[in-house]
Amino acid sequence: MSMQEWAMLAVLSLLWGGSFLFIGILVKVWPPFTIVTARVGLAALALWIIVRASSVTIPKSPKVWLAFLGMGLLNNVIPFCLIVWGQTRIPGGLAAIFNATTPLFGVIIAHFLTNDEKLTVNRLIGVLVGFAGVVVMIGPAVFSGFGGDTLGELAVMLAAVSYAFAGIFGRRFKAMGLPPLLPAAGQVTASTIVLLPVALLLDKPWTLPVPGLETIGALLGLALLSTAVGYVLFFKILATAGATNLMLVTILIPPSAIVLSAIVLGDHVEPRHLAGMVLIGLGLMAIDGRIWRHLRKRWVVT
């Protein structure tokens, strides 16, 4: 990837790292379907306002909208519901570990379903080292939660699988010639249409208590930053860097969440956090490959 693509990936990890903070606030007040529906609904509204303001032509082809629906199911409806529900049963740190398995599933799925994103030794080693960095960063205390709620763990793991398939599925939007703004708006719109009747039927949101300022702030951050802005970056990176590189964002999310917690909440950064970040950095360098190729050339010359 280019330096610009790495920079976009880092920004995306910050936006999605913040989502764990926002969800942690919201699950104390609202049930999962209400949270997810409000998230995608507000994001859809914001993105269509931007689409109209930018004079981008809205596609009318049923084929395109069917693709938006498929992307919405794989990238929003299924993983969002599974993660939010999972976070009601397991700690956020444990959820982050399972979420960080997305690139592991991604490199395997891409190897079999694509012609240009085959599994390489560098990529596999890099993903494994990066995943080890996530585990080190979260620390030994989280392992006490393993097996405590198998269904919660399985839910977040299945969300990671769904994200991996979404990365492969989303490659088609580049072939359709759509700017990143349109698939971002289209998928959250399709997701809202699917989720709204479910939330109304199961959660009966009109019976819930009136949200406070903290809840409203968390929802706006989740919908506008983590979702609306995040998915515009998502599709931009996907179009230029490919699905397996894009999925590396899930490895970067835990350090981003820790940095945000330190800045926003004043949380202490511990040595294990720094050690984990070093491992993640080494894993990303292995995937990128440029430093190792440079060192190999110097070794051969000497």
Image (tube, grey):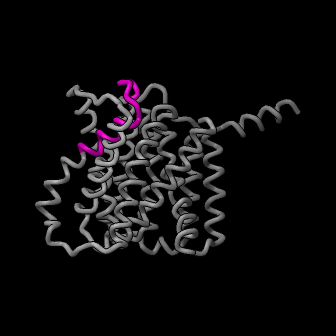
Residue at the limit of the structure toward the left, as seen here: 201
Say which quadrant the C terminus sits in: top right
Relative depth, front residue between 293 and 2: 2
Q: Position of residue 14 (x, y in %)?
A: 51, 55
Picture quadrant of residue 174 = top left
Residue sitting at 31 percent across and 74 percent down?
A: 212
Q: Position of residue 204 (x, y in %)?
A: 13, 66
- Residue 71: x %, y % from top left: 30, 40
Q: Main secondary structure of the magenta part?
A: helix
In the rendered structure, the answer to whether residue 168 lies left or right of residue 41 reads right
Q: Is residue 89 magenta?
A: no
**Residue located at (27% from left, 72% from top):** 211
Left or right: 113, with 190 as reference point: right
Residue 92 percent across, percent down from the top left: 42, 68
Q: Is 145 drawn above or below residue 193 in the view shown?
A: below
Task: Please name the residue shown 56% across and 57% down the image.
Answer: 132
Q: Quarter holding the N terminus? A: top right
Q: Nearer the viewer, residue 209 or 71?
A: 209
Residue 186, magenta (yes or no):
yes
User: Which residue occupies the foreground of this view, 5 or 296?
Assistant: 5
Tell me if residue 76 comes above or below residue 175 in the rendering: below
Q: At 71% across and 39% down in the image, what residue appears?
A: 292
Total marks shown come to: 0
Residues shaded magenta: 174-190
Pick out the residue farthest to the front.
53
